[in-house]
Amino acid sequence: MQQSQTILGLESSCDDTAAAIVRIGEDGAQVLSSVVLGQAELHAAYGGVVPEIAARAHAEKLDICVEQALTQANMTLSQIDGIAVTAGPGLIGGVVSGVMCAKGLAAATGKPLYGVNHLAGHALTPRLTDGVAYPYLMLLVSGGHCQFLLVSGPDHFNRLGGTIDDAPGEAFDKIARLIGLPQPGGPAIEETARSGDRNRFAFPRPLLDRPGCDMSFSGLKTAVLRTRDSLLAQQSGLTRQDQADLAAGFQAAVVDVLSEKSRRALEAYTADGERSFCVAGGVAANQAIRAALETVSSRFNATFVAPPLALCTDNAAMIAFAAAEQAGTRPPDDMTLSARPRWPLDRVQAPMLGSGKKGAKA
């Protein structure tokens, strides 16, 4: 890396439009501004993110985000050293919007352009917030992804395990809809579960009977569905206590699975010096999950790192920082940079979810 870099980052892979400016120098990284414009109200009536609506909203808001990020940082585009953008994976319409905006900015300013893997942004966040040294163990747990990664460099990721079907965040959203809670499902489940009995329903803990760090949440989701249907058949509706108990039981099952798989990943993770166990991604905002993972980490005398909540969910600061980290290991991209709906971090191992015409899924 250069002695000092100031990077403008753009993020538009799902339903948050974001721009941020990050300065990286000898004293570490500093987030000069971070703007995130959500779309929850646009998708509320549909029970989930509608890709076409999200893409249109990104196209309308990206320039607004950039302007606000520059204003917050008291800077102009001429003072920026590079443009970074999420180039995948994600909802393709949103990713295209971000990539095209970044290309326009790079062409107009003559600044270098860096296409960044959205997952790499999350995986490198502990270095942005805490300066964690390589190698470290990362649990990337979000709405669309769940992986244990050994992070050995800015573009060197070794997957130890991951979900073979639904990601936890996806499962949280689906369960919230099943039991009549609002979206986004993660915060709704967490809040409702506080008044619930986690032991009322005997939900499964998938794949704990098999070795390794792979995870599955589709069977758990089905178990909650069947329990809900049984309650509906018995009493023609769900009481608030039913909702709380279903939420608490589901969340407890997810916590148990992530805790046990984290224990196994920590057993497989070795380092010469201090060991660090990091967690990032939207689901990492769940306090019950954070507390359980911190407990597991302490048993292995590993430093537990969970970035601030604002940097766990989708943001552009992580994209700007990832570009700065990778700038020393690869050249900038040119105007042929394309949006990628699929983009595995570990390019050596076989994809967990298979491949298609668009490439490996994860």
Image: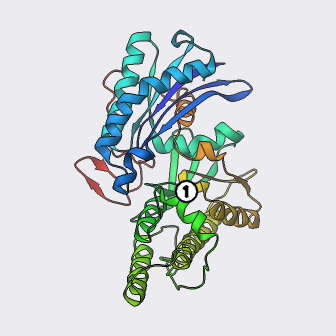
Instruction: Work out whether residue 263 or residue 347 is closer to the camera in this orientation and state it.
Output: 263
Q: Secondary structure at mark 1?
A: helix
Task: Tell me if residue 167 can be seen.
Answer: no
- Going 58% across and 47% down the picture, which residue do you hit? 312
Which residue is at a point 60% across and 41% down the rendered structure image? 125
| Residue 45 appears in the rendering | yes
Residue 311 sits above or below residue 245 on the image: above
- The amino acid marked with disc number 1 is Val
**Quadrant of the rendered image containing residue 108:** top left
Q: Position of residue 42 (x, y in %)?
A: 38, 44
How far from the left and from the top, in percent, is residue 139?
A: 57, 56
| Quadrant in the picture for residue 237 | bottom left
Q: Is residue 209 above or below residue 74?
A: below
Work out whether 64 lies above or below 45. above
For the residue pair 349 and 320, the one nearer the viewer reads as 320
The image position of residue 266, as x and y in percent, is 64, 63
Using the image as rendered, state which of residue 196 and residue 2 is in the foreground: 196
In the rendered image, residue 13, in percent from the top left (x then y), is placed at 41, 41
> Who's the residue at 65% across and 65% down the image?
288
